[in-house]
Image (cartoon, helix red, strand yellow):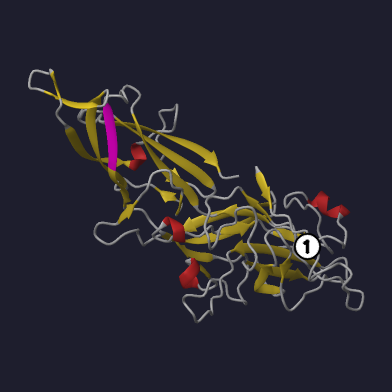
Amino acid sequence: MICLMACSNEEPVTTTMTMDGMTPIAFRDAYTAQPTRSSAAYSAEEGIDAGQSIGVYAYYHDNTTWSAAAVPNFMWNQQATCLEKGGNFSYSPLKYWPNESEDKLSFIAYFPYTDVDAADPESAESPTKTGLTPLMANSDAGLPTFRFTVKETADEQVDFLVSELLPNLPNGTSAVSPGNPDDRSTLTVNDRVRFLFHHMTSKVEFRIVAAAEVRKDIAHFLLKSLSVSNLYKDGKLTPAYNTSTGETSYAWSEQSAKHGTSPANTFPLKTLTGYLMMPQTLSNDVKLSISYDVTFKSDGTTYTYDGEGRLVPQQDYTYSNDATIQLNTMKRTGTDTPLTEWLPNHHYVYYIRIGAETIPDRWWSGSIKLRLMI
Protein backbone atom coordinates (compact mmCIF):
# COMPACT_ATOMS: atom_id res chain seq x y z
CA MET A 1 0.00 0.00 0.00
CA ILE A 2 1.33 3.42 -0.93
CA CYS A 3 0.46 6.36 1.29
CA LEU A 4 -0.24 9.49 -0.75
CA MET A 5 1.10 12.68 0.68
CA ALA A 6 -1.26 14.91 -1.26
CA CYS A 7 0.14 18.34 -1.91
CA SER A 8 -2.88 20.25 -3.16
CA ASN A 9 -2.16 23.74 -1.87
CA GLU A 10 -1.23 26.03 -4.76
CA GLU A 11 1.06 28.44 -2.87
CA PRO A 12 3.75 29.60 -3.07
CA VAL A 13 4.78 27.91 -6.34
CA THR A 14 2.30 27.91 -9.24
CA THR A 15 2.60 27.05 -12.90
CA THR A 16 1.75 30.64 -13.88
CA MET A 17 5.06 31.94 -12.56
CA THR A 18 7.49 32.41 -15.43
CA MET A 19 10.76 34.19 -16.10
CA ASP A 20 11.50 34.88 -19.75
CA GLY A 21 9.14 32.07 -20.71
CA MET A 22 10.72 29.55 -18.29
CA THR A 23 8.73 27.35 -15.91
CA PRO A 24 9.63 27.07 -12.22
CA ILE A 25 10.42 23.68 -10.73
CA ALA A 26 7.99 22.72 -7.98
CA PHE A 27 7.66 19.66 -5.74
CA ARG A 28 4.28 18.06 -5.17
CA ASP A 29 2.59 14.77 -4.36
CA ALA A 30 5.55 13.25 -2.60
CA TYR A 31 4.74 9.62 -1.94
CA THR A 32 6.05 7.51 0.88
CA ALA A 33 5.83 3.85 1.75
CA GLN A 34 3.57 2.94 4.67
CA PRO A 35 4.97 4.74 7.73
CA THR A 36 6.78 2.81 10.41
CA ARG A 37 5.83 4.56 13.60
CA SER A 38 4.29 7.71 14.99
CA SER A 39 6.97 10.17 16.05
CA ALA A 40 6.14 13.65 17.23
CA ALA A 41 9.24 15.08 15.59
CA TYR A 42 10.07 13.17 12.42
CA SER A 43 7.32 10.79 11.36
CA ALA A 44 6.28 10.72 7.72
CA GLU A 45 2.92 9.25 8.74
CA GLU A 46 0.02 10.63 6.68
CA GLY A 47 2.34 13.08 4.99
CA ILE A 48 5.18 15.29 6.11
CA ASP A 49 4.05 17.78 8.74
CA ALA A 50 4.02 21.53 8.21
CA GLY A 51 7.42 23.03 8.84
CA GLN A 52 9.31 19.77 8.22
CA SER A 53 11.61 19.50 5.25
CA ILE A 54 13.13 17.18 2.70
CA GLY A 55 16.60 17.60 1.22
CA VAL A 56 16.88 17.58 -2.58
CA TYR A 57 19.82 16.89 -4.89
CA ALA A 58 19.36 17.81 -8.57
CA TYR A 59 21.67 17.24 -11.54
CA TYR A 60 21.68 19.22 -14.78
CA HIS A 61 22.53 17.27 -17.94
CA ASP A 62 23.53 19.52 -20.83
CA ASN A 63 22.35 17.46 -23.80
CA THR A 64 23.28 14.27 -21.91
CA THR A 65 21.58 11.77 -19.62
CA TRP A 66 22.21 10.46 -16.11
CA SER A 67 25.48 8.74 -15.31
CA ALA A 68 27.37 8.06 -12.09
CA ALA A 69 29.73 10.86 -13.11
CA ALA A 70 26.96 13.45 -12.73
CA VAL A 71 27.49 16.17 -10.11
CA PRO A 72 24.59 17.79 -8.18
CA ASN A 73 25.32 21.13 -9.79
CA PHE A 74 21.68 22.23 -9.96
CA MET A 75 20.59 21.63 -6.35
CA TRP A 76 22.84 20.50 -3.51
CA ASN A 77 21.10 19.51 -0.27
CA GLN A 78 18.35 21.97 -1.12
CA GLN A 79 15.90 22.36 1.74
CA ALA A 80 12.26 22.12 0.65
CA THR A 81 9.72 22.71 3.42
CA CYS A 82 6.12 21.52 3.52
CA LEU A 83 3.74 24.44 4.09
CA GLU A 84 1.01 22.34 5.67
CA LYS A 85 0.51 18.63 6.33
CA GLY A 86 0.05 17.14 2.90
CA GLY A 87 0.76 20.51 1.27
CA ASN A 88 3.18 21.90 -1.29
CA PHE A 89 6.90 22.27 -0.64
CA SER A 90 8.52 25.69 -0.61
CA TYR A 91 12.19 26.38 -1.34
CA SER A 92 14.44 29.29 -2.17
CA PRO A 93 15.98 30.44 -4.42
CA LEU A 94 13.49 29.26 -7.00
CA LYS A 95 14.91 27.17 -9.88
CA TYR A 96 13.53 26.78 -13.43
CA TRP A 97 13.27 23.98 -15.95
CA PRO A 98 15.76 24.15 -18.84
CA ASN A 99 14.27 25.82 -21.91
CA GLU A 100 15.92 23.43 -24.36
CA SER A 101 14.22 20.06 -24.79
CA GLU A 102 17.47 18.11 -25.05
CA ASP A 103 18.61 19.28 -21.61
CA LYS A 104 17.53 17.08 -18.71
CA LEU A 105 17.41 17.14 -14.91
CA SER A 106 17.69 14.26 -12.45
CA PHE A 107 16.41 14.38 -8.85
CA ILE A 108 16.79 12.44 -5.60
CA ALA A 109 15.60 13.45 -2.11
CA TYR A 110 15.72 12.34 1.52
CA PHE A 111 13.90 12.98 4.81
CA PRO A 112 14.39 14.54 7.30
CA TYR A 113 16.42 17.42 5.90
CA THR A 114 19.67 17.87 7.82
CA ASP A 115 21.81 20.98 7.74
CA VAL A 116 25.37 19.71 7.92
CA ASP A 117 26.50 23.18 9.00
CA ALA A 118 23.90 23.65 11.76
CA ALA A 119 25.68 25.12 14.78
CA ASP A 120 22.87 24.48 17.27
CA PRO A 121 22.88 20.76 18.26
CA GLU A 122 19.25 21.09 19.41
CA SER A 123 18.11 22.42 16.06
CA ALA A 124 15.55 20.14 14.41
CA GLU A 125 17.74 20.23 11.30
CA SER A 126 21.08 19.39 12.92
CA PRO A 127 22.88 16.03 12.64
CA THR A 128 22.83 15.73 16.43
CA LYS A 129 19.04 15.98 16.49
CA THR A 130 18.26 13.77 13.49
CA GLY A 131 21.09 11.25 13.84
CA LEU A 132 21.64 11.80 10.10
CA THR A 133 24.63 13.31 8.32
CA PRO A 134 24.63 13.82 4.53
CA LEU A 135 28.18 13.04 3.38
CA MET A 136 28.12 14.38 -0.16
CA ALA A 137 30.14 17.49 -0.97
CA ASN A 138 28.79 19.78 -3.69
CA SER A 139 31.67 18.76 -5.95
CA ASP A 140 31.17 14.99 -5.51
CA ALA A 141 29.82 12.88 -8.37
CA GLY A 142 27.04 10.28 -8.21
CA LEU A 143 24.26 9.84 -5.69
CA PRO A 144 24.45 11.25 -2.15
CA THR A 145 25.59 9.02 0.72
CA PHE A 146 24.56 9.33 4.36
CA ARG A 147 25.80 8.45 7.82
CA PHE A 148 22.96 7.53 10.19
CA THR A 149 22.75 6.60 13.87
CA VAL A 150 19.61 5.12 15.44
CA LYS A 151 18.49 6.87 18.61
CA GLU A 152 18.48 4.92 21.90
CA THR A 153 14.77 5.33 22.68
CA ALA A 154 11.75 4.67 20.48
CA ASP A 155 10.28 8.15 20.96
CA GLU A 156 13.43 9.79 19.58
CA GLN A 157 13.93 7.48 16.61
CA VAL A 158 13.83 9.03 13.16
CA ASP A 159 11.96 7.72 10.13
CA PHE A 160 14.87 8.04 7.68
CA LEU A 161 13.62 8.02 4.06
CA VAL A 162 15.44 8.19 0.73
CA SER A 163 13.68 8.47 -2.62
CA GLU A 164 14.29 6.67 -5.85
CA LEU A 165 16.30 8.59 -8.43
CA LEU A 166 14.13 10.39 -10.99
CA PRO A 167 16.52 10.59 -13.98
CA ASN A 168 16.49 12.63 -17.17
CA LEU A 169 13.29 14.60 -16.64
CA PRO A 170 11.98 17.09 -19.21
CA ASN A 171 9.95 20.16 -18.28
CA GLY A 172 7.62 19.04 -15.52
CA THR A 173 6.56 15.61 -14.33
CA SER A 174 3.30 13.73 -13.98
CA ALA A 175 3.02 10.38 -12.19
CA VAL A 176 6.49 9.43 -13.34
CA SER A 177 7.52 5.80 -13.02
CA PRO A 178 11.31 6.00 -12.59
CA GLY A 179 11.92 2.79 -14.54
CA ASN A 180 9.59 3.56 -17.43
CA PRO A 181 10.93 6.23 -19.83
CA ASP A 182 7.74 6.04 -21.90
CA ASP A 183 5.81 7.67 -19.06
CA ARG A 184 7.85 10.80 -19.54
CA SER A 185 6.71 11.31 -23.13
CA THR A 186 3.32 12.60 -21.96
CA LEU A 187 4.55 14.99 -19.28
CA THR A 188 3.33 18.55 -19.19
CA VAL A 189 4.84 21.71 -17.80
CA ASN A 190 1.91 22.07 -15.40
CA ASP A 191 2.98 19.24 -13.12
CA ARG A 192 5.45 19.03 -10.28
CA VAL A 193 8.28 16.67 -9.44
CA ARG A 194 7.13 13.63 -7.45
CA PHE A 195 9.34 11.48 -5.24
CA LEU A 196 8.89 7.84 -4.26
CA PHE A 197 10.45 7.39 -0.81
CA HIS A 198 11.54 4.18 0.90
CA HIS A 199 12.28 3.51 4.57
CA MET A 200 15.98 3.00 5.17
CA THR A 201 15.50 1.39 8.60
CA SER A 202 13.87 -1.87 9.70
CA LYS A 203 10.78 -1.75 11.88
CA VAL A 204 11.09 -4.38 14.64
CA GLU A 205 8.73 -5.25 17.48
CA PHE A 206 8.54 -7.99 20.08
CA ARG A 207 5.35 -9.55 21.46
CA ILE A 208 5.40 -11.80 24.52
CA VAL A 209 2.44 -14.18 24.78
CA ALA A 210 1.49 -17.20 26.90
CA ALA A 211 1.83 -20.58 25.24
CA ALA A 212 -1.45 -22.02 23.99
CA GLU A 213 -1.39 -24.88 26.50
CA VAL A 214 -1.24 -22.54 29.51
CA ARG A 215 -4.65 -22.12 31.14
CA LYS A 216 -5.21 -18.45 31.79
CA ASP A 217 -7.50 -19.20 34.73
CA ILE A 218 -4.68 -20.83 36.71
CA ALA A 219 -1.56 -18.93 35.63
CA HIS A 220 -0.69 -15.27 35.37
CA PHE A 221 2.49 -13.97 33.71
CA LEU A 222 4.28 -10.75 34.66
CA LEU A 223 6.97 -9.53 32.29
CA LYS A 224 9.69 -7.86 34.34
CA SER A 225 12.24 -6.96 31.67
CA LEU A 226 13.00 -7.41 28.00
CA SER A 227 16.13 -6.38 26.11
CA VAL A 228 18.32 -7.16 23.13
CA SER A 229 22.11 -6.95 23.11
CA ASN A 230 24.92 -6.39 20.60
CA LEU A 231 22.89 -4.68 17.87
CA TYR A 232 24.56 -2.19 15.56
CA LYS A 233 23.02 1.25 15.67
CA ASP A 234 24.90 3.10 12.93
CA GLY A 235 26.02 2.74 9.35
CA LYS A 236 26.73 4.39 6.02
CA LEU A 237 23.98 4.31 3.37
CA THR A 238 25.00 4.24 -0.29
CA PRO A 239 22.27 4.49 -2.95
CA ALA A 240 23.00 3.29 -6.49
CA TYR A 241 21.10 3.58 -9.77
CA ASN A 242 21.04 0.91 -12.47
CA THR A 243 20.63 2.58 -15.86
CA SER A 244 19.67 -0.73 -17.48
CA THR A 245 16.78 -1.59 -15.15
CA GLY A 246 15.86 1.91 -13.99
CA GLU A 247 16.01 0.76 -10.37
CA THR A 248 17.51 2.51 -7.36
CA SER A 249 19.13 0.28 -4.73
CA TYR A 250 20.37 1.06 -1.21
CA ALA A 251 23.24 -0.61 0.70
CA TRP A 252 24.32 -0.25 4.34
CA SER A 253 28.00 -0.60 5.29
CA GLU A 254 30.65 0.54 7.79
CA GLN A 255 28.64 -0.44 10.87
CA SER A 256 30.66 -0.04 14.05
CA ALA A 257 28.80 1.38 17.07
CA LYS A 258 26.37 -0.71 19.12
CA HIS A 259 23.38 0.19 21.23
CA GLY A 260 23.80 0.56 24.98
CA THR A 261 26.85 0.99 27.14
CA SER A 262 29.94 -1.16 26.68
CA PRO A 263 30.49 -3.93 27.60
CA ALA A 264 26.78 -4.74 28.05
CA ASN A 265 25.63 -3.25 24.70
CA THR A 266 22.04 -3.71 25.85
CA PHE A 267 18.98 -2.05 24.32
CA PRO A 268 15.88 -2.17 26.61
CA LEU A 269 12.61 -3.04 24.90
CA LYS A 270 8.88 -2.70 25.47
CA THR A 271 6.30 -5.07 24.06
CA LEU A 272 3.88 -3.87 21.37
CA THR A 273 6.29 -1.07 20.45
CA GLY A 274 7.72 -0.60 16.98
CA TYR A 275 11.43 0.26 16.90
CA LEU A 276 13.19 1.75 13.89
CA MET A 277 16.41 -0.25 13.95
CA MET A 278 19.54 -0.36 11.85
CA PRO A 279 19.33 -2.99 9.06
CA GLN A 280 22.04 -5.59 9.67
CA THR A 281 23.11 -9.22 9.67
CA LEU A 282 22.22 -10.73 13.05
CA SER A 283 25.44 -12.19 14.44
CA ASN A 284 25.50 -15.04 16.98
CA ASP A 285 26.07 -12.64 19.86
CA VAL A 286 22.80 -10.76 19.26
CA LYS A 287 20.71 -12.04 22.18
CA LEU A 288 17.18 -11.41 23.39
CA SER A 289 16.92 -11.51 27.19
CA ILE A 290 13.66 -11.91 29.08
CA SER A 291 12.78 -11.96 32.76
CA TYR A 292 9.29 -12.85 33.97
CA ASP A 293 7.24 -14.19 36.89
CA VAL A 294 4.39 -16.67 36.69
CA THR A 295 1.85 -16.87 39.51
CA PHE A 296 -0.46 -19.86 39.82
CA LYS A 297 -4.10 -19.32 40.75
CA SER A 298 -7.49 -21.02 40.43
CA ASP A 299 -10.90 -19.39 40.43
CA GLY A 300 -9.48 -16.40 42.20
CA THR A 301 -7.71 -18.54 44.82
CA THR A 302 -3.93 -18.81 44.53
CA TYR A 303 -2.28 -22.15 45.16
CA THR A 304 0.96 -24.07 44.81
CA TYR A 305 2.09 -27.67 44.46
CA ASP A 306 3.49 -29.71 47.33
CA GLY A 307 6.41 -32.13 46.94
CA GLU A 308 4.08 -34.87 45.74
CA GLY A 309 2.49 -32.78 43.02
CA ARG A 310 -0.73 -32.11 45.00
CA LEU A 311 -2.40 -28.70 45.08
CA VAL A 312 -2.14 -26.75 48.30
CA PRO A 313 -4.85 -24.02 48.30
CA GLN A 314 -4.77 -20.58 49.91
CA GLN A 315 -1.07 -20.14 49.30
CA ASP A 316 0.75 -17.96 46.83
CA TYR A 317 3.34 -19.43 44.54
CA THR A 318 5.30 -17.30 42.11
CA TYR A 319 7.94 -18.78 39.84
CA SER A 320 10.65 -16.50 38.39
CA ASN A 321 12.67 -17.16 35.28
CA ASP A 322 15.43 -15.41 33.34
CA ALA A 323 16.43 -16.65 29.93
CA THR A 324 18.34 -15.63 26.82
CA ILE A 325 17.52 -16.38 23.18
CA GLN A 326 20.00 -16.23 20.30
CA LEU A 327 18.00 -14.04 17.95
CA ASN A 328 19.24 -15.49 14.67
CA THR A 329 17.91 -18.94 15.61
CA MET A 330 14.28 -17.80 15.60
CA LYS A 331 12.32 -18.99 12.58
CA ARG A 332 9.83 -17.35 10.29
CA THR A 333 6.21 -18.30 10.93
CA GLY A 334 5.34 -21.61 9.30
CA THR A 335 8.89 -22.35 8.12
CA ASP A 336 12.12 -23.93 9.32
CA THR A 337 14.12 -20.96 8.05
CA PRO A 338 15.80 -18.78 10.70
CA LEU A 339 15.75 -15.04 10.20
CA THR A 340 19.39 -13.93 10.14
CA GLU A 341 19.16 -10.45 8.61
CA TRP A 342 17.07 -7.30 9.00
CA LEU A 343 16.46 -5.54 5.69
CA PRO A 344 15.49 -1.90 5.10
CA ASN A 345 11.82 -1.18 4.41
CA HIS A 346 10.74 -4.41 6.18
CA HIS A 347 8.58 -4.91 9.26
CA TYR A 348 9.47 -7.81 11.60
CA VAL A 349 7.20 -8.97 14.44
CA TYR A 350 8.74 -11.45 16.88
CA TYR A 351 6.35 -13.65 18.88
CA ILE A 352 7.83 -15.18 22.05
CA ARG A 353 5.59 -17.78 23.68
CA ILE A 354 6.36 -18.68 27.28
CA GLY A 355 5.12 -21.66 29.25
CA ALA A 356 4.45 -22.28 32.93
CA GLU A 357 7.37 -24.58 33.71
CA THR A 358 11.06 -24.72 32.91
CA ILE A 359 12.18 -27.29 30.36
CA PRO A 360 15.88 -26.89 29.48
CA ASP A 361 16.25 -25.30 26.04
CA ARG A 362 12.49 -25.47 25.53
CA TRP A 363 11.03 -23.06 28.03
CA TRP A 364 10.16 -20.79 25.13
CA SER A 365 9.01 -21.12 21.57
CA GLY A 366 8.89 -18.39 19.03
CA SER A 367 8.20 -17.28 15.50
CA ILE A 368 8.57 -14.21 13.33
CA LYS A 369 6.02 -12.61 11.08
CA LEU A 370 7.42 -10.52 8.25
CA ARG A 371 5.95 -7.97 5.87
CA LEU A 372 7.27 -5.21 3.68
CA MET A 373 6.71 -1.71 4.97
CA ILE A 374 5.02 -0.70 1.70
In percent of width and height, residue 262 lies at: 26, 61
Q: How many marks?
A: 1
Prevailing SS of the magenta stretch? strand
Most extreme residue toward the bottom is 119
What residue does disc 1 label?
9
Task: Judge whether 283 appears above or below 256 on screen.
Answer: above
In percent of width and height, residue 36 lies at: 54, 50
The one of 97 and 352 positioned closer to us in this rendering: 352
Q: What residue is drawn where x is 63% and y is 68%? A: 51
| The magenta stretch spans residue 131 | no
The one of 64 and 53 positioned closer to us in this rendering: 53
Left or right relative to 329: residue 324: left
Give the residue type at disc 1: Asn
In percent of width and height, residue 258 lies at: 35, 59
In the rendered structure, which segment of residues is drawn in magenta? 219-223
Mark 1 neighbour class, 10 Å CA radius: few under 14, some 14 to 19, many 20 or more: some
Q: Looking at the rendering, which quadrant does residue 290 occupy?
A: top left
Residue 70 in view here: no
Task: Judge whether 324 appears above or below 217 on screen.
Answer: below
Q: What element carries label 1?
A: loop
In percent of width and height, residue 301 lies at: 22, 26
Left or right relative to 290: residue 43: right
Q: What residue is drawn where x is 51% and y is 75%? A: 123
Most extreme residue toward the right is 21
Q: What residue is drawn where x is 74% and y is 79%? A: 93
- Quadrant in which the C terminus appears: top right
Residue 192 in view here: yes
Q: What residue is drawn where x is 47% and y is 75%? A: 122
